[in-house]
Image: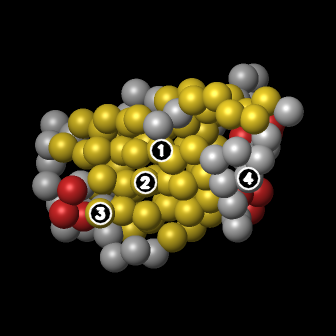
Amino acid sequence: QVQLVESGGGSVQAGGSLTLSCVASGVRSSIDTMGWYRQAPGKERELVASITIDGGTNYLDSVKGRFTVSRDNAKNTAYMQMNNLKPEDTGVYYCYRLIRGAKYWGQGTQVTVSS
């Protein structure tokens, strides 16, 4: 069973930075993708960033240049560095791991950015 444990959320003022971490355990796979979705109140969940096992990345247009996703395969951990945070980045951030078509989720961590 795949488990994902997130950490690193919090409250910051606009322009601040946070780093999210996601530690994966359970199913071992040499082919997977990890990343984060976020969900703001009253809005649908949206994909923020993803990274493949070999380091290929993808970003939501609104976070390009501000967020950086990375991973340490030896530690089964993904990271997302979030800089120059904006109030519209506020939401619950969910780590995910995609293995052979199955998506697994972390518990979510709250990010609140005040103006």
Q: Position of residue 10 (x, y in %)?
A: 57, 29
From the image, tell me which residue sits under label 3. 72
| 92 relative to 65 in the view: left or right | left
From the image, tell me which residue sits under label 4. 84
From the image, tell me which residue sits under label 1. 20
Kindly identify the residue that appears in the image at 70 percent across and 67 percent down.
65
Which amino acid, by three-letter code, is at mark 3?
Asp
Which amino acid, by three-letter code, is at mark 4?
Asn
Kindly identify the residue that appears in the image at 16 percent across and 37 percent down.
1
Which amino acid, by three-letter code, is at mark 2?
Tyr
Foreground tag (4 vs 2): 4
Helix, strand, or loop for circle 2? strand
Helix, strand, or loop for circle 4? loop
| 107 relative to 76 in the view: left or right | right
Q: CA distance from mark 4 to mark 3?
A: 24 Å
Instruction: Give residue 106's mark.
Output: none
Neighbour tally class for label 4: few under 14, some 14-19, many 20 plus, Cα within 10 Å: some
| 48 relative to 8 in the view: left or right | right
Foreground tag (4 vs 3): 4
Label 3 close to label 2 by CB (< 8 Å): yes
From the image, tell me which residue sits under label 2. 79
Q: Earlier in the sequence, mark 1 or mark 4?
A: 1
